Each structure stands twice: as C-alpha cells, then as structure tokens.
Image: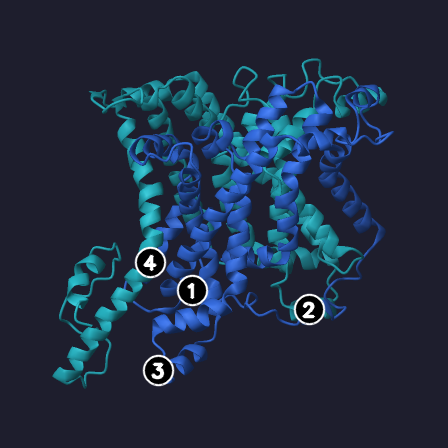
C-alpha cells in the first residue's frame, strides 16, 4: 500500500461544512426513475434476507412450512421469549461483551500510542517502522490460528479464557488501526505542536493533553471497527472456547445445528444475536466511513 | 534524568530500525554546532528515541507475541511430524509440504480460493462501481440507502451464513418455494448440496455480504473528486457517461486499487461463511485452504500438515500481495 505520508485532504478530524452538497452542477440532475429503480432493487436484495429472518422469528414452524414466503399471521412471540429466557444466551452475550471490550481497549490505547510517533515525529527509519505495521496486514489470521491455539493453550495457559481470545484479536487488529489512525494524527495542524512547545509542554505532555482529546473521532472509528470485529469473530473462539465460555457466534452456530428443525427458533436466535453489533455500527456509521476513507487514500 | 543510561539498552533493542551511530550528531544540522551544542543534541536525540520506544513498544510487543511468533511456529511445525503433544522431535524435512501439495483436497481448496479471489473482484468491482456511481447524486433517501447497503457487511459471517442456510433449504426453504411458485424447478440436491452449484452459491452469498464495503469505499472516494472538474466538464458539454469514464473512474483509481487488495487478502483467508454453510462440502467442492488447515489441525491432529498448509497459504498471500503492489498499486495515477 502506497499509504499516505501527506495528510488526506478530506479527512480532517473536525467535520467540514460540505460545500459539495450544493452546486447543482455536481450531480447531473439527480433522481431519474432508473436510479430509483436500481436503488429499490439494491435495497430489496440487501435487506430481504435479514428482514425475512427477523419476521420469521415471529412465526411458528407450522406457518413457515405452510407458506414460507408470508408475513406472520398471527404474530407469535414465543420464539423470542424462548431465547431471552435462555440462560445460555445471556452467558454467551456476557462473554461476547467482555471479550469485545478488552479487545477494543487494547487496540485503541496501543494503537494511538504507536500511531503518534509514526505520525508526528521525524526520525530515521520511521517509514520502515510503519511498514512493519503495514506488513502486519499481510499476515492472515488463519495462517497463525493453529499455532496460536497451541501457544495459548499450552504455553500461556489462556485456553478457554476471555484474555486468550481478546489478546490475539487485538494484535491482529493493530495494523489496521495504526494505518487508519496515522493520517488522522497527521492531519492535526503543526501550529498546535509549536504553540504547545512555546508554552513549555513536552512532547509527551502534548500527547496527553492535546493530541488525545483531539483524536477522539479517529479513536472512535478504530474502536468501533475493533469492537464489531471482535463481536463477529468466529474462528479463534471456535478453537479456544468451550462450554460456558462460548461467545454469541458460537452459540448461534450451535443452536442452528442442534435445533435445525426449529427454523423459527433459529431465526429468533440469530436476530437477537445480531442486534447489538448492528445498532452500534449504524450509530457510528459516518465515522467508520471517514476512517476507512483516510486509510484508503492511496 | 539520571537513569537514562540504564534504559538505553532497552530502547536500543526495541526493534526500531533507527540507530544513528552513538555519539554522532544528526547530519543535516547547521554546521555551527559548538561542542556543548553537540552534547545537547545527543541528549535530545536520546530522549526522543526513548519516547518513540515508549509509544511504539506495546503495539510491537503484541504483534511479535501473537502474530509473528505464531507464524514462525507454523513454519517450525511444518517440518515435523507432530500431533500437538510434547516436543517436536520427529523431523521430516519437506515431507509435509510434499503431502500437502500432492493432496487433491488441498489443491482443490487452493483452486477454490483462487476462483473466489478472481470472481469476487470480477463481480463486485463492476457491480459496486455501478451502484456507487448511481447513488452519487442528489436523491431522496440517500443517507438511508448508504446505511442499508452497509448492513450485510456488519453482520457476523455466522449470522449471515445461518440465515442463508435456512433460506436455501431444499424444497422447503423460501427461495425454492418461490421458484416453484413461478413454475421453475429448483436443483434436486439443493443449492448448497450440488457439487457443481455449491461454490457459485457461496459466491453469490459472499457478494451479498461484502458488496456494501465496496460501495461505501467507492462513495467515500467519490467525495474526493473536486466539483470544479464536474463543472468544467459540463461546460464542455460532456455527457454523464463521458464524465464518469474520463473523470470519476480514473480519479477513483487509488480507492479501487486499495479495495482490490483488501478483497484479495480476505478471499484467501475465507473460512467462517463456508464453514457455516457447507463445512467445505459437498465432496470438498467449497473447501478453502483455511478449511483444510483447520480440519487437519483439529480433527486429524496433523499439526505438521496444518503447519505446511499455513505456510503455503501465507506464501501465496505474500506472492500475490507483492505482485499486486508491483503491478497495480505502483502504477501512476491513470486509468484504473
């Protein structure tokens, strides 16, 4: 990746008034019927399966076999209440939350620390050091997953534990985090640093008192990405966690194979399992896009 | 700071590749440096190096411990016959590599991975680009549309896989029911049960899952195209299509190339979705390298074989990444 050494123009942390939204010249007269037709098809194809799953959770298996492609009639809530009153579901949710919180905390703290000198110090070997992190993007997690499983269970004694999943997940998320955060930190104006230095603030003081508060948006971006990545992770938890330590995706997979005949129940379980990540992500969507955009500007 | 000297060694060994020879001042400074000034620069340099080490070490340590070390262990495993217990003693040289590369299942998985890499880009690039260009205009509900397109990308692969598995149930699933309703005959073994269809079915689901990322990235890239270009083009009387071809798509080049890279690496690592949908079946028709090595490592306890498969997977990812970098990322900004 020929990544940025120049700050990307469009991802200054502070939101800019979007002048481009005006200027009718920009978008050749917008919504023609064709565009709306395409948009409609895209929306149906995208949301169809998800909505079908959500709605099927409100039907009985009898209704599902009778007419698979129909709305709930009558609406039944037993599938959802069944999941909500299932203690395993809450145990899995707890595990997912704890692992995601630990992962996110490590990623954000260590990520912003590593990105700071890479963004704002000049020193020999800076680009080489940055390339070490970029190279981390090349290590597919699957390559390391079997040795990780052995190291964590045999050498670190972290098998079947929260930390055993969170630490490696954080490590694999760090490269992307540094790649995304660096342009954010570079985009902060040089004058801030100079002013701070004139006031006698050390560079470490600058980091704590000025840079951290200002890089909030960037940290939120990588934090959300790390959280959702952890929330959805499957392979590593699959190898490491058993019984009561399982996370929600493992629970979903188990439930769907154990109750394969109970289609409505499976849909209810998957729906409830996906809600938190969905809500969290959609609330933060703009930030994510901006963060990704900063990293992608080649 | 009296204890600076004590920490120097730590900072020296902290993997930062910046090592100005001790006692020399940085070059490129104005040559007016009196000896005393030299002293100060040295202290400053040392302090700066300590600061850099302090900030970078935690992240680097994590990388070494949980990324680099396991990868090295995979390489080590690959030259032993080992069942995961006790020390590795049964050295077998390259025998594991020979058995992996002559294993029909592994070779089939590798081919599947390559098909997925190529097909994902071939399907998602034009589709994603078309949708992004169409949505890149003032229209009603624009923000909501962007959000909706992103939804599948946020879902866990497991959740998406389970939902699709249910939709595609042979005969009783909603898709087959709808097909029968309009008089079409669904495949008798089911979309995921027919060895000739399964991989393509998985590809359709992967497209559904990941197209949102492409669209969102392309849309973000489109925001970076300056308005003046569009205004100028309009003054010149260019048609909408000409503007897209001559201005928008070329300027999206960097975004597209980066997305292609991410997509490629993701396709090589594919595991979750396939595991949920088919476990790699039927008859290994949808197996990937990741599925192969997880099976070898967990079910068969062939850690040597799993290690060799990991190294081959990594080698392929590396070669493809380097080629991609050489051939595609390094092109001058031009026609994408």
- Foreground residue, B267 or B129? B267
**Could you tell me which chain the residue with mark 3 belongs to?**
A
Co-location on one chain, circles 1 and 3: yes
Using the image, name the chain to which the residue with label 1 belongs: A
Can you identify the residue that label 3 sits on? A200
Q: How is the image coloured?
A: by chain
Rendered position, B145 above or below A253: below
Residue designated by label 2: A20
Is A254 in front, or is B51? A254
Tag 1 residue: A5
For disc 4, the marked residue is B56
Judged from this view, the residue extending furthest toward the top is: B188
Along the polypeptide, which appears first: circle 1 or circle 2?
1
Query: Which residue shows up at 15% across the image and 72% down it?
Result: B24
Please state which of the two labelled residues, at mark 4 or mark 2, is closer to the viewer.
4
Crowding at label 2, few (<14), some or many (≥20) Cα neighbours within 10 Å? some
Looking at the rendered structure, the secondary structure element under dot 4 is helix
Rendered hue of chain B is cyan
Check disc 4: other Cα within 10 Å, few if <14, some if 14-19, many if 20+: many
From the top left corner, tell me how far across and down residue A26 is, in percent. 72, 66
Chain A, hue in figure: blue
- The chain letter for the residue carrying disc 2 is A
Q: Are marks 3 and 4 in contact (CB under 8 Å)?
A: no
User: Residue B169 at what x, y percent from top left?
Assistant: 70, 20
Element class at badge 3:
loop
Q: Any mark on residue B316, and which?
A: none
Where residue A198 appears, x then y in whole percent? 37, 85
Task: Bin the neighbour count of mark 3 within 10 Å (Cα to Cα): few under 14, some 14-19, many 20 and up.
Answer: few
Disc 4 with disc 2 on a shared chain: no
């Amino acid at each position: 990746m020929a990544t940025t050494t120049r700050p990307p123009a469009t991802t200054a942390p502070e939101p800019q008034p979007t002048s481009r939204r005006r200027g009718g010249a920009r978008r050749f007269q917008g919504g023609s019927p064709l565009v709306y037709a395409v948009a409609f098809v895209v929306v149906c194809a995208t949301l169809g399966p998800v909505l079908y799953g959500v709605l099927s959770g409100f039907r009985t298996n009898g209704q599902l076999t009778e007419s698979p492609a129909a709305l709930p009639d009558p609406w039944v809530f037993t599938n959802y209440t069944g999941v909500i009153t299932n203690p395993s579901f809450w145990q899995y949710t707890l595990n997912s939350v704890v692992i995601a919180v630990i992962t996110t905390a490590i990623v954000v703290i260590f990520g912003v620390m590593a990105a700071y000198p890479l963004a704002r110090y000049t020193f020999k070997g800076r680009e080489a050091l940055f390339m070490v992190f970029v190279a981390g993007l090349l290590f597919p997690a699957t390559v390391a997953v079997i040795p990780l499983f052995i190291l964590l269970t045999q050498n670190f004694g972290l098998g079947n534990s929260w930390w055993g999943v969170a630490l490696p997940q954080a490590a694999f998320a760090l490269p992307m985090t540094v790649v995304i955060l660096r342009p954010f930190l570079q985009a902060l104006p040089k004058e801030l640093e100079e002013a701070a230095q004139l006031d006698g603030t050390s560079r470490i003081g600058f980091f704590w008192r000025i840079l951290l508060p200002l890089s909030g948006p960037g940290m939120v971006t990588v934090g959300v990405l790390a959280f959702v990545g952890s929330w959805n992770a499957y392979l590593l938890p699959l190898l490491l966690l058993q019984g009561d330590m399982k996370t929600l995706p493992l629970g979903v997979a188990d439930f769907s194979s154990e109750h394969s005949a109970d289609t409505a129940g499976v849909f209810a379980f998957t729906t409830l399992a996906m809600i938190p990540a969905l809500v969290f992500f959609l609330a933060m969507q703009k930030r994510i896009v901006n963060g990704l955009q900063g990293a992608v500007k080649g | 700071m009296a204890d600076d000297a004590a920490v120097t060694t730590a900072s020296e060994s902290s993997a930062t590749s910046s090592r100005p020879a001790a006692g020399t001042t940085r070059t490129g400074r104005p040559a007016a440096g009196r000896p005393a000034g030299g002293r100060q620069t040295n202290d400053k340099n040392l302090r700066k190096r300590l600061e850099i080490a302090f900030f970078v070490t935690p992240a680097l340590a994590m990388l070494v411990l949980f990324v680099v070390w396991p990868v090295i262990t995979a390489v080590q495993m690959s030259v032993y016959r080992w069942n995961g217990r006790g020390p590795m003693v049964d050295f077998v040289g390259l025998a594991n590599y020979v058995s992996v590369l002559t294993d029909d299942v592994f070779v089939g998985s590798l081919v599947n991975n390559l098909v997925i890499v190529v097909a994902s880009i071939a399907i998602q690039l034009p589709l994603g680009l078309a949708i992004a260009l169409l949505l890149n205009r003032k229209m009603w509900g624009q923000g909501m549309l962007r959000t909706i397109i992103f939804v599948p990308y946020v879902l866990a692969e497991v959740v998406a896989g389970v939902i699709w598995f249910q939709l595609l149930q042979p005969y009783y699933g909603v898709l087959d029911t709808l097909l029968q309703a309009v008089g079409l005959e669904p495949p008798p073994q089911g979309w995921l049960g027919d060895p000739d269809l399964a991989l393509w079915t998985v590809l359709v689901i992967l497209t559904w899952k990941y197209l949102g990322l492409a669209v969102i990235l392309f849309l973000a890239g489109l925001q970076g195209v300056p308005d003046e270009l569009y205004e100028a083009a309009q003054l010149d009387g260019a048609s909408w299509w000409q503007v897209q071809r001559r201005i928008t798509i070329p300027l999206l080049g960097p975004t597209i190339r980066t997305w292609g890279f991410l997509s490629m690496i993701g396709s090589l690592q594919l595991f979750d979705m396939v595991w949920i949908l088919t476990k790699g079946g039927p008859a290994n028709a949808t197996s990937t390298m990741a599925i192969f090595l997880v099976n070898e490592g967990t079910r068969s306890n062939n850690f040597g074989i799993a290690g060799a498969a990991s190294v081959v997977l990594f080698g392929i990812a590396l070669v493809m990444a380097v080629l991609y970098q050489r051939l595609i990322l390094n092109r001058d900004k031009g026609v994408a």
